[in-house]
Image: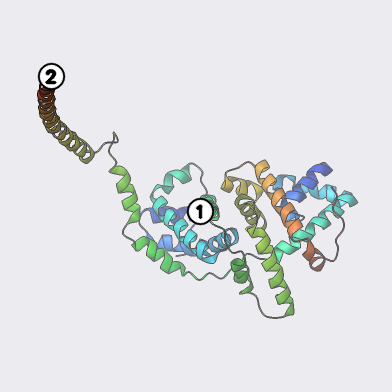
């Protein structure tokens, strides 16, 4: 039951086809979880958010036909729901960024290089955790989630110019936060032009 | 070819990897990159941050079982139907009959309490006036 486009699965789920909904969940769960962990910095928060996003998907499915006719893309709609839930959650008391760092590290094989990578991952994620939530979401969508500028702007419901502004500020902050790691990561460190 | 300032803006926003640049500007940006040592140096410098970000890949372990999650949602006491039913049950004009009945009952109780208390208070007031009048009469007799 993994066949069919997202739209088709949504339509079938809307008609009460539980198997179609299960296929939709199976297809999007890993990416949604990864994205939510990256934005919230917390596995437990991310899992709750992903469940809520899928619940909203199930509730939405009977009305999906009209949305799709109006040109809505499932992945864009779903990612917007997910990211908004993450941003709302992030506005609550702060997370512990290293929880997500441990999450990434847990997937890596052993070895000295891996230890260095874990350290870098932890530093990157900790620095990411200090960014304002919209900057963090923009960078996550564009750098790690592979979204185009148009998709990311639509998901965040902002213009492409506003998206670029968020990205510039996010990268500038990270560049300063992670400056001490730069020589280890890339031997070539030519001076930045201003 | 695009202006160097625009290429710099693209790199500042999206990093040095051309695949992340906007599709409609990529070809022109690559052309500038191929023809400008300054542009290449700028991109190389931005690539340092890209490399650090790439060392924190987005691939956490997923511990939730998709089938179990889907079953949990679809088996739950039909929240989809409940959400719609709750919406459709909303009274058209904002006041449902239970609200109106409660409001009417509160008005009646308030009226009864007010009326009985008013009569009681009036009687008490009359008694007080009579008492004061009799005292005044007594005082007048002394003076």
Assess disc 2: are there few (<14), some (14-19) or many (≥20) residues with their C-alpha within 10 Å of its C-alpha.
few
Can you tell which of label 1 and label 2 is closer to the viewer?
A: 2
Residue depicted at x 69% and y 65%: A123
Q: Which residue is mark 1?
A: A85
Describe the element under mark 2 as helix, strand or loop: helix
Q: Is residue B40 left or right of residue A8?
A: right
Q: Residue furthest right?
A: B37
Q: Quadrant of the N terminus of chain B?
A: top right
Residue depicted at x 20% and y 39%: B102
Q: Residue furthest front?
A: B143
Chain under numbered label 1:
A
> Toward the viewer: A26 or A171?
A171
Can residue B1 be seen here? The reply is no
Q: How is the image coloured?
A: rainbow
Where on the picture, by quarter, is residue A124? Answer: bottom right
Describe the element under mark 1 as helix, strand or loop: helix
Q: Quadrant of the C terminus of chain B?
A: top left
x, y percent for residue B90: 29, 41
Q: Could you tell me how many numbered marks the image carries?
A: 2
Q: Is residue B110 left or right of residue A109?
A: left
> Toward the viewer: A84 or B141?
B141
Q: Is residue A101 left or right of residue A190?
A: left
x, y percent for residue A78: 51, 53
Where on the picture, by quarter, is residue A182? Answer: bottom right
Assess disc 1: are there few (<14), some (14-19) or many (≥20) residues with their C-alpha within 10 Å of its C-alpha.
some
Residue depicted at x 80% and y 50%: B30
Q: Which mark is residue A96?
A: none
Share a chain, discs 1 and 2? no
> Toward the viewer: B50 or A100?
A100
Q: Which residue is mark 2?
A: B140
Chain under numbered label 2:
B
């Amino acid at each position: 039951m993994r066949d069919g486009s997202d739209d088709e699965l949504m339509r079938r789920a809307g008609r009460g086809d539980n198997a179609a909904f299960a296929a939709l969940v199976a297809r999007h769960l890993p990416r949604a979880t990864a994205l939510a962990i990256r934005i919230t910095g917390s596995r437990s928060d991310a899992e709750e958010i992903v469940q809520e996003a899928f619940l909203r998907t199930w509730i939405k499915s009977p009305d999906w036909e009209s949305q799709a006719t109006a040109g809505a893309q499932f992945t864009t709609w779903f990612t917007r729901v997910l990211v908004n839930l993450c941003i709302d959650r992030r506005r609550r008391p702060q997370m512990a960024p290293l929880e997500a760092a441990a999450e990434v590290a847990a997937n890596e094989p052993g070895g000295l290089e891996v230890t260095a990578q874990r350290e870098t991952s932890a530093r990157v994620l900790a620095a990411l955790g200090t960014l304002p939530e919209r900057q963090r979401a923009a960078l996550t969508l564009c750098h790690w989630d592979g979204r185009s500028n148009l998709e990311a702007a639509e998901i965040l419901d902002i213009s492409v110019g506003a998206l670029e502004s968020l990205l510039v500020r996010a990268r500038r902050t990270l560049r300063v936060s992670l400056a001490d790691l730069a020589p280890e990561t890339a031997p070539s460190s030519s001076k930045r032009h201003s | 070819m695009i202006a160097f300032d625009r290429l710099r803006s693209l790199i500042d926003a999206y990093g040095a990897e051309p695949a992340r640049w906007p599709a409609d500007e990529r070809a022109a940006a690559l052309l500038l990159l191929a023809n400008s040592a300054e542009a290449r140096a700028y991109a190389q410098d931005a690539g340092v941050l890209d490399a650090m970000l790439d060392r924190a890949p987005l691939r956490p372990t997923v511990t939730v079982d998709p089938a179990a999650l889907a079953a949990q949602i679809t088996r739950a006491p039909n929240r989809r139907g409940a959400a719609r039913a709750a919406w459709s049950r909303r009274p058209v004009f904002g006041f449902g009959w239970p609200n109106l009945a409660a409001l009417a009952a509160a008005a009646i109780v308030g009226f009864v309490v007010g009326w009985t208390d008013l009569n009681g208070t009036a009687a008490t007031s009359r008694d007080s006036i009579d008492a004061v009048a009799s005292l005044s009469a007594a005082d007048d007799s002394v003076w």
